Amino acid sequence: MVARMQLNHRMRLPEAKKYVADKLKVSTVDLSDSTVMRNLREELDIGCVEAIPGLAKGLAAKARIADLLDIKIACVEKLKDKMP
Amino acid sequence: MSKIRTRMGDGSVVEVTPDELRNELVTGSEDAADKGQVPALDENEVDKLVEIFSAPWRIVGVEPGHEVPLTKDETACTLISSQLSSGAHLPISREAAIEVFERVFAFDTMELGWIDYSFKPAKPMVSLDQVSIERLLATTVFPVLYGAMPNMGLYYTPDGPFTNPADLLPLMKMDEAREAEMNAAELCREDMVYMCQRFDEIGADGIDFDTTASAGDADFWATLKTVEELKKTTDLGIEVGMSGEFILGMHGEVEYDGQRLAGLFPHQQLKLVEKAGADIFGPVCNTKTNKTTPWNVARAATFVKEVTKTATIPIHVNVGMGVGGVPMFETPPIDALTRASVAMVEVAKVDGL
């Protein structure tokens, strides 16, 4: 998520971390805490490293990330264009 | 007196005393300061590097909270290619390899690229790469980029249509050589714009231009013009990764926005990359194999610190085989690699690797 804010919104690292941390309602230090983030990602259903049945994966996870971070993700927009 | 175990730029082990270590760091930084006309590292920064290199552990890391994201070049060749890309040649698809990078190696982004990782040979296969990226965009969560090298040299004979300047220059055919370079640059630009727009069509998150300026100043010009065009016509995030710390003046008179490109160092390259509209800049500092890793890392950190000081876009320094202070060896030793990485984060203040 921090990398997305850098790549698609040109944010330097402190700004990118703060943006994501604020949206996730955690501290910037928590962003790199694997224990915090593993639980949070499952709770927010935005994609986990392990394959857990029923949890959002791939495009579904990215759609939820786009909504959470209030950004557009190109492939999610392409999917919306394809929806009947 | 206890010795500190470190490496040479070729990867071989060497031991230095604490005084020798500090001297290596200072002289490495002074070399960069002299070449690039940038400030050398101050005493606190040298102390930090002494701390990093004196640590007795094989692997070192950043302080908690200082972690940075990663972008990567050369796609998943580490897994699927052969020695020509320092690869393990695992019999898995490119798509599976990229998913391994996300789920097993915990990378923050990845790029897909053609196995012959330059724009010119990849162009005929663009529709195959498009569907590969589409498949990855559906199955992964992290940003997926398309990566390739401008590699403008492929547009010269025998691989391309324009007479190789290396054949013209010894004949003192300077004008013909420059014309060939600019013709190659224009065709390279056209191909890169064409390909990148195909990836925008299918929703790729971005493009990584790898080893930009490998064929010199005209190669850099072609990439800057491509970035400029893509930022006007697509939604792609764009990363420009360089090939060397110094733009070779193969042409000598190419300019971008009134600035001559030959001879530019990383902090000067940055300004043009920003002007073209890129989103991430990846500076390169080349490792000298006959110098120690501390010398090389201090030198690289000095160049990169000047980049991060004035950057308005994220800086993802190249830290890998032969760049960023890391030894020039196809399996870079992890003690040197982690120390170079930590130095870039803690001293050069980069936004990513």
Image: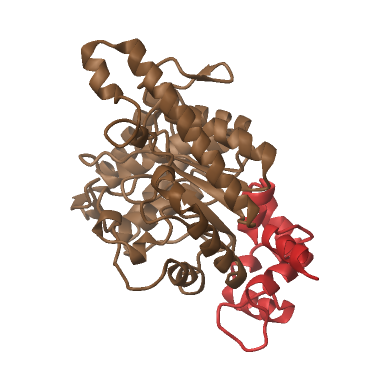
Chain colours: A red, B brown
Instruction: Name the residue: 66% across, 71% down.
Output: A59
Q: Position of residue B126 (x, y in %)?
A: 49, 53
Residue A51 seen in render? yes
Residue B39 seen in render? no
Looking at the image, how many numbered discs can be counted on the residues?
0
Left/right of residue B292 with respect to residue B131 in the rendered view: left
Q: Position of residue B52 (x, y in %)?
A: 39, 53
Instruction: Determine whether B18 is above or below B80 in the image.
Output: above
Which quadrant holds residue B28? top left
Left/right of residue B12 with respect to residue B333 in the rendered view: left
Instruction: Determine whether B182 is above or below B65 in the image.
Output: above
Instruction: Determine whether B242 is above or below B326 in the image.
Output: above
Left/right of residue B92 with respect to residue A38 in the rendered view: left
Along the viewing direction, whichever of B314 and B54 lies nearer the viewer = B314
Instruction: Name the residue: 62% across, 48% down.
Output: B237
Instruction: Name the residue: 65% across, 68% down.
Output: A30
Along the viewing direction, whichever of B117 and B35 lies nearer the viewer = B117
Q: Position of residue B87 (x, y in %)?
A: 30, 62
Left/right of residue B281 with respect to residue B337 in the rendered view: right
Along the viewing direction, whichever of B42 and B243 lies nearer the viewer = B243
Instruction: Determine whether B29 is above or below A45 in the image.
Output: above
Along the viewing direction, whichever of B161 and B129 lies nearer the viewer = B161
Instruction: Name the residue: 62% across, 30% down.
Output: B275
Q: Position of residue B151 (x, y in %)?
A: 39, 38
